[in-house]
Amino acid sequence: MLPLPRFEYSAPNDVRDASRFLAEPGSQLIAGGTDLLVSMKQRLFEPRHLVSIRRLGLRGVTVQGGVVRIGAATTLAQVATNLTVREQFPALSDACLTVATPTIQSMATLGGNLMLDTRCLYYNQPAGWRASLGYCLKREGTVCHVAPKGRGCYATQSADTVPALWLYGAEVEFQSTRGVVLRKVSDMYRDDGMAWHGVGRDEVLVAVRLPLAEARVGHRKLRTRQAIDYAQVLVAVRAPVADGPWAAVISAVASSPLFVEAEDPTALAEAAFRASQPLSTHLPAATWRKRMVRVEVARAAAALGDGR
Ligand SMILES: Cc1cc2nc3c(=O)[nH]c(=O)nc-3n(C[C@H](O)[C@H](O)[C@H](O)COP(=O)(O)OP(=O)(O)OC[C@H]3O[C@@H](n4cnc5c(N)ncnc54)[C@H](O)[C@@H]3O)c2cc1C
Ligand code: SF4
């Protein structure tokens, strides 16, 4: 069993106090802890001070002025079973239910999912495993084992809820001592496995806002086992809105999700295939994962019917 490193713990009841703690070097926010505590045991993160979200009052789903607002500390199980979410955003509900297992879904939060670190076969391992390879560029090493001649880290964005939230047009509310900032999910992620978001270290993700529109979105996750496993390919597809194009977001194949549009489902699947350039960040062959992007986009589009 891997022991946790020592840390201090605070549970403030005001977001500005949490933000002040987080501004101090060595502090990190903890929500459900389902990823962070595992990563701490693997010595991927070694915060000296954990600042908890649990007393910040960020749990629950409300509807106001044509917008559904989901508090960051709402668990994936609560999001998935919320009636408004199930009726208006079924692909988000489906995506929550593909994360890990029901026990983890009842601890894991939506905010924690959006802030999930990028993943790689050579990174998400215990410290001893990584040490035997001399670590890697993303943490403690100097070489990328996936692309030794590459220009950086290619760890993949693998959070299950992101593709569906992107296509529903979600925005994310961050709060710090400087005030509130809104970011579109579609603008949040960067194509860099190490610096994969531009969020300040003292910013707390407080809520996700979803416009009540008529978007029809489907979600698919390719993985070896139908529980526990992270995605090898993650896909969301949106049927045309009015006379617009079909749209897809493909994830788990690059450090940021990829967005493609096309006139019909066949062209969409082809565009997704061409845009995806997975590397050996996962056990299954990258060439197979690339081909499966086309298959999964076609399946998601077929499940939405003709889109009209
Ligand atoms: C066995 C196993 C399988 C898993 N499978 C999947 C999977 O298939 N798909 C998937 O997407 N995830 C998976 N996870 C990861 C994890 O359970 C989920 O991503 C979960 O939603 C993370 O939420 P959390 O509240 O537990 O976050 P935490 O672990 O508490 O935090 C995760 C990260 O987000 C930051 N953070 C959390 N909340 C906020 C906030 N409000 N504002 C700013 N930063 C914040 C933390 O500082 C930390 O860096 C798995 C985990 C395990 C243990
Ligand atoms: S892509 Fe390379 S640098 Fe990034 S985590 Fe994997 S092995 Fe490390």
Image (cartoon, rainbow, N blue to C red):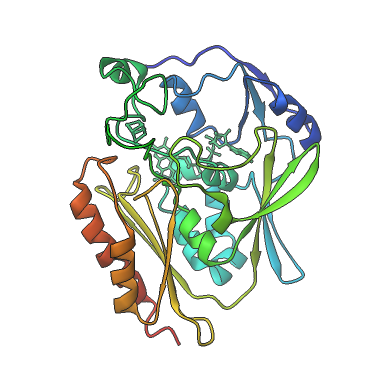
State the image coordinates of residue 25 (x, y, percent, origin top left): 65, 20
The quarter of the displayed image where residue 257 is located: bottom left
Say which quadrant the N terminus sits in: top left
95 left or right, relative to 268: right
Give the left or right position of residue 26, taking residue 299 as reference: right
Q: Quadrant of ligand 2?
A: top left
Is residue 29 in sight in this rendering? yes
Residue 269 coordinates in the image, percent (x, y): 30, 70
Q: How many marks?
A: 0
- Which quadrant of the rendered structure holds the C terminus? bottom left
Q: Quadrant of residue 203?
A: top right
**Residue under the image location 57 percent in, 71 percent down:** 88
Against 83, residue 189 (above or below) is above
Up the image or down, 33 lies above or below 139; here it is below
Residue 77 picture location, percent across and down = 52, 50
At x 45% / y 41%, what residue is drawn?
192
Q: Residue sitting at 34 percent across and 49 percent down?
A: 231
Left or right of residue 302: residue 34? right
Residue 258's x, y, as percent?
42, 58
- Work out whether residue 74 or residue 27 is closer to the camera in this orientation and state it: 27
Outermost residue to the top? 6
